[in-house]
Image (cartoon, rainbow, N blue to C red):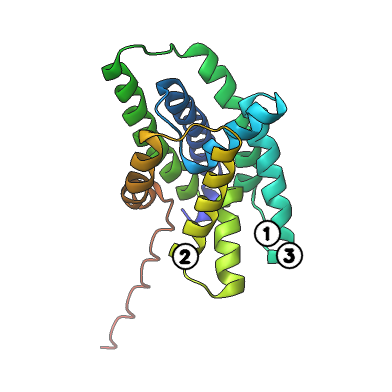
Amino acid sequence: MPLRHQTARRLVQLYVGLVCYGVSMALMIQAGLGLDPWDVFHQGLSKLTGLRFGVIVILVGVAVLLLWIPLRQRPGIGTISNAIVVGLVVDPAVALLPTPRAVAAQWAFLIGGIVLNGIATGLYIGARLGPGPRDGLMTGYVARSGRSIRLVRTTIEVTVLTAGFLLGGQVGWATLLYAVSIGPLAHVFIPLFSVRSPAVAPAPAEPLAA
């Protein structure tokens, strides 16, 4: 079926991916070994303002969406959902998950969180209903500036990481491990979960005249 007739499947995949993304963030928070650059920033803002982590995730997502306006980016339902659902999931997930004390358990939470994050990324991007606010900021700036994706992504992530660290966000082994592993994980899981339109079968050949 063409993409327009796969709406239910794509919506289910989108929201499963976003829920998994929130849980993956909670796993990394509970591991206590550091966070990815954006979550270092979220955690720093949470400490500064006293607001819950999930609330900060939503507010930052909305603020980043406002930056799409001068970049002339158009959000999809996946974009708006990303800005809201992940933040709604992460706080309850943190509350439900135990805090591991043993080093082995901390690393299990961390590695599990990073792998689940890669799977979640593949699910929500593969649904093809719009990129997340932070991904769209990167691609929009690339399109407008003509600079490379590598340069733009690195600049954005170093900026938010530095700001988050200065605000008191936790930088640690997770920060480094996430940086080197999320690209390869996304490379595997985005194609795996991408919703594709099936190739149109060629029309049967006309029979030759007798």
Please name whichever residue, 50 or 152, is drawn nearer the observer in this view of the structure.
50
Q: Looking at the picture, which amino acid does disc 1 mark?
A: Arg
Please provide percent x and percent y for residue 100: 37, 13
Please provide percent x and percent y for residue 77: 64, 46
- The kind of secondary structure element at disc 3 is helix
Please provide percent x and percent y for residue 75: 66, 54
Query: Which-is-in-front pick, marks 3 and 2?
Result: 2
Vertical comparison of 197 with 116: above or below: below
Q: CA distance from mark 3 to mark 2?
A: 20 Å
- The kind of secondary structure element at disc 1 is loop
Query: Which-is-in-front pick, marks 2 and 1?
Result: 2
Residue 22 visible, this orientation? yes
Residue at the location (50% across, 52% down)?
158
Query: Which residue is labeled 3 in the image?
Result: 70
Query: Which residue is labeled 2 in the image?
Result: 151
Q: CA distance from mark 2 to mark 1?
A: 23 Å
Please name whichever residue, 203 or 72, is drawn nearer the observer in this view of the structure.
72
N-term-proximal mark, 3 vs 2: 3
Q: Looking at the picture, which amino acid does disc 2 mark?
A: Leu
